Image: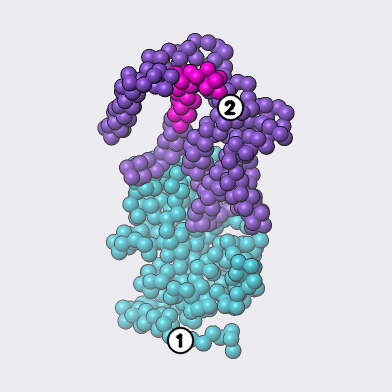
Amino acid sequence: MRAPIIRFENVCKRFSDKEGRELAAYAVKDLSFDVAGGELVAVVGRTGCGKSTMFNLLAGLLEPSSGLVRVYGRDPFRDFDWFRGKIAVVFQSDRLLPWRTALHNVAYGLELNHMEERERLGLARDWLRRLGLEGYEDAYPHALSGGMRQRVSIARAFAVNAQILLCDEPFSSLDELTGAKLRAEFVRLVRENRKTSIFITHSIDEALTLGERILVFQPPAFIVLEVRPEEAATEATRAAMKDAILSAMTSEVRDPAAS
Amino acid sequence: MLRQLAVRREALFAMLGLATAWQIASLFFPSYLFPPLPAIGAAFAKIFGSWEQVGNALATALRILAGLAGAFLLGVVFAVAMAKSRKANDYLFPILHFNQGIPALSWVVISIIWFKSIEFRIWFIMVVTTVPAFAFQILDAYRSISKDLHEMALSFRPSRYDMFRTVVLPTVVPGILTAFKVNLGNASRVVVVAELVGATGGVGYQLLQMQQLFDLAGALAWTLVLVLFVLGTQQILTLLESRLLRYRAQSERGL
């Protein structure tokens, strides 16, 4: 058993209204799980089940209302700067800076890590090449297709060489063919670079393809099922696992924390 | 390129049409009402034939630029305060809004009563009349910063300076350039009013002299000097815009 790098311990998150009063509804309630170093965990659940809130808590973009979020034993919200270069994020949309070329977008994280210009541009160029975008270094985002832009954003996340990679449905806006191709590239890169990854998706097939472990969420972000795709050796067991995930996602489960 | 040339050709034809109509009018009306084009041209040449007159033109140009610079800096301060603090926004917004309704001429009267220095009077009038537009436009540009891009940048943990340099500044630059373009026209009108009433030099003062001498050719020549300054500065801003915003040239210029 590998040592956990990411730890959620009874984490709750309630958002506030414009006057700063906490809303009654929980976005995340009593969420607990661990992720070991080098593990690729897929998180599935319906829209509004709190996946993205969990993601933002982990990225340090949100502070939990209660409970502990720990990455390398530190709080990603309070020790925000300490995580510079240690966590990289691939978002659902490419979120490229429109005023930067593909090359300078890939080099963005490296620039913020104060890497010397020649070195960072060389590294960015190398990542563009690895993702099949050689020759597009000077193209601005508007001149690239959706798939190419998403590849630039993946290159941007990998270029900083962060040990933890957080992905929020990065292939959901792409067509089936481009998505499948990028998915395969992504898995190869994660394995090659031995990243610890959390991959949010609403596609069960994608979760089964990518995840070493799958966490199934129900609102307000508590885990109703945890499976390991590697345990489904045959087509039949894989189909059964898929049915179990689907049933866990769609069934009416009573919030265990409410009882 | 071809479209740009066509637009320039049409602009040239439009100006030639206007000049021809003026010249025809000058044949039917007394010269103090419609001075012929050669007379206006001679008055224009006379301005650039004397250092003293060029100094008058330059004084107005510098007043406009100094006024715009002051209003821009103050506009940035107001916009940042309004963006960062709701309280500041609640207090500053009505004041700036109210200020927009005050005519430039009222500020001329107020500044003559308030201040002794002529240059400061003009600078004050320029700043106070153009600052609301700067503040509102910069505030709008600041508020248009994409939440998605801001979050993306945050995920790399930038310093405040890096966030400003890499996300905030490139987002607000188009708004700042627009604010300068809009305010340049306003400033050129206000400076003339300010100089007409409270200055001893500059285009506005010269216009007053021409009115007293009943010299319409001279008045038109001075007006032309101001128009050319505004158009020239607008052209510099356009060049700057196409340089700074080249990343969106292909997608938006064709609209």
Describe the element under mark 1 as helix, strand or loop: loop
Nearer the observer, B149 or B12: B12
Are the residues flagged by discs 1 and 2 in contact, CB closer than 8 Å?
A: no
Nearer the observer, B177 or A52: B177
In the image, residue B119 lies at what x, y percent? 66, 27
**What residue sits 63% from the left and 30% below the top?**
B122
- Extreme-bottom residue of the structure: A259
Identify the chain of the residue marked 1, using the numbered disc in the image.
Answer: A
Q: Which residues are magenta?
A: B208-234
The answer to whether A101 appears left or right of B92 in the picture is left
Please, which colouring scheme is shown? by chain
Can I make out residue B221 in this image?
no
Amino acid on which the number 2 mark rests in the picture: Leu
**What residue sits 55% from the left and 11% below the top?**
B51
In the image, residue A168 lies at what x, y percent? 46, 64
Residue A208, quarter of picture: bottom left
**What residue sits 30% from the left and 64% below the top?**
A176
- Does B105 appear above or below A258? above
State the separation of the CA atoms marked 1 and 2: 78 Å
Residue located beneath label 1 in the image: A252
Q: Chain B shown in which color?
A: purple
Predominant SS of the magenta segment? helix
In the image, residue B41 lies at what x, y percent? 41, 15
